[in-house]
Image (cartoon, rainbow, N blue to C red):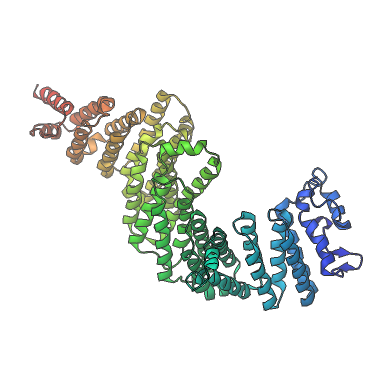
Amino acid sequence: MPLGICPFQDRDGPFTSPPTAALEQLVPCSCGGQCLWGGTGRCGGGAGPSLAVSSAQAKPGRNESFPGTAEFERRLLKFLRASVDTVDDEAWAEALSSELSRRLSSSASSSAEKSFLYKALGTVLASCKGVLHVQEKLLQHLAEANAEEPCEAQGIIALLSHAAESNFHTVLATLTTFASRLCKGRNARISRSKKMELDSTRAHATRSALMLAHGSVALRASKEQLLAHLEGDIVGNILMLYSCSCRDLQNNLALVQSITDSSSAFQAVGDSASFNRSLKSKLLEILMDLMKKYYSGMPVSPVPLKVVLALEQLSKLKPSFESKDMREMLVLCCKNVVTHPSAEMMLKIRKSQHAAQYLQLQQTALKALGRLMVVLLETEPSGGFFQNIVHVLQKSMTSTNVWERKRALQTCSQLLAACEELQRGDACEHFGSLVGLLAPLTCDPMPASRQLAVTCLTSLLRIQAKAVHTVIETGDIKGLCEGLHACSIASQLQITSKMARIVCRNFPIERTVDFMAAIKETIRKASGVRVRACGKWMTTFLQMHGKDISWNVPPILYILRSITSFAQQSTFLPFLCQAVVILTRCHTEAVMSNFSRPLGPTDSETWKRIREFCLQCWSR
């Protein structure tokens, strides 16, 4: 133990004191993590000579290396376990656990002492070999704990997980016994008072705590223990507890977290292990149902964000999901994490008391969604799945919701970074579409979105260069990216024009129509400076590659014609006219041939005037 902290040491050496005397030094020392910083809590008197010395040494300013409360507690529990194992006296260990149990029962629920005592008791029980003794203590405190209080729920989880370190089978058997009492009794012929007890909020809170405890125990299990018990006993118990719960927010969060923990534990076993396919499908179905339940229209909830974390871990387990399930999973995740919440809801969230907590969870979920996409890409080698991702993100990248666009860009940047790392050429097939979607976002109102758009374009260029084995001419992209911090619209448009020239120098012209179609989609939904950015990129591309795209003139003219029916066409009109002029100069016959055809009933007045003007000029 560092800094001379040895809670059980007396003049005759470690552990010559009876358990009660040892405990008198252990507990004050445990909450010394708070009092050592100069407080005057429970640790005031009676802490023992060794603690007094440690306190004097550990005051802030006297020893900068003294660990924080959590680290201090971890080392103390480690020392406790090592000491009990060294003594190797079963009677002494059981007596110490009984004394810890007695003190635990009499401690105030919200005290730091009780929180530590749960862990200390679990640590000592892990060293006890008597199965009946361990079960008795665990069942006693499972029955006593009021899981409605968060500190009590955390306490029993800590008790069970610490005890499972060396008594995995005993703890799991105890959990199964207690869980069965909470669930099977509800369907049996029991008294009204017993039924009310099993349907009480306390019973439902206990079920949530037990679900979390199963996940925590799984994380501490060995490979052999997991392979033998994860699917049938641990996950089986979790689903049993959930099936008889009230399925409120607390129950749903507990279920999702326990699935996340169980999946993470099984993943740690290694690639050789294969998870039960039908059970994996059942877990997926449950998680997807939760995603659907909490989708837009309901109050903002952490459940969908937590589900993404669970799906990330579950997707890593073999065998892989079927393509249909992966597509549905992707769409639902994007809807819940990228599309939702709305701009109005985001404003309410940012003003709420729990804004920081929710926004941090949202960022965590976005990162998890990016990692989930990587997992799905690795397990689904076909290019069709990447196309599905682009299609899903396209709706959000052209959204009128500024927050949604930012979230879509964050996801896209992770996706492209993954493609670059995995050396997948999928992105090259969608180069035109992605550039058309990303280009206007270099002039997004949010500086962070502008930066993300440039990051995505840079990744896309590197992927394209590797695919065709060329060197990219990027110029000073980093400097341009930094310049996008500017609030001036004129500065943004100037920088985006320079960026357009860099990207267009490396543009595969066979992706021209995809690019123009994506630009059209943005113009249909966007307004203001983003529409002008679309015009800058389109005219820059046509100026640089207009002569090389003769076979694409008819579809490009069709796209330009459809743009004139949009409400935003007045902002885009100067660029549209410039585009027609460039095409006419480069491919006069093809453009005039197209204009010579009869007008359609849906053609706008703007397009009719452009057509008549070009035909008159050509006839001269």
Kindly identify the residue that appears in the image at 34 percent across and 61 percent down: 323
Q: Please indicate whether residue 27 sits to the left or right of residue 544 in the image.
A: right
Residue 59 spot, x, y in % from top left: 81, 46
Classify 243 as above or below 601: below
How many badges with numbers are in the image? 0
Q: Please indicate whether residue 348 sits to the left or right of residue 502 in the image.
A: right
Q: Quadrant of the C terminus?
A: top left
Residue projecting furthest to the right:
11
Q: Quadrant of the N terminus?
A: bottom right
Kindly identify the residue that appears in the image at 54 percent across and 58 percent down: 201
Answer whether residue 470 is visible to the viewer in this image. no
Q: Nearer the viewer, residue 59 or 200?
A: 200
Question: Image quarter for residue 325?
Answer: bottom left
Kindly identify the residue that appears in the image at 23 percent across and 35 percent down: 547
Question: Image quarter for residue 375?
Answer: bottom left
Residue 139 spot, x, y in % from top left: 64, 70
Q: Nearer the viewer, residue 126 or 444?
A: 126
Q: Please indicate whether residue 594 sits to the left or right of residue 517 in the image.
A: left
Classify 127 as above or below 407: below
Residue 344 spot, x, y in % from top left: 42, 36
Residue 263 spot, x, y in % from top left: 50, 64
Q: Please indicate whether residue 536 sits to the left or right of residue 250 in the image.
A: left
Question: Image quarter for residue 518?
Answer: top left
Answer whether residue 206 is visible to the viewer in this image. yes
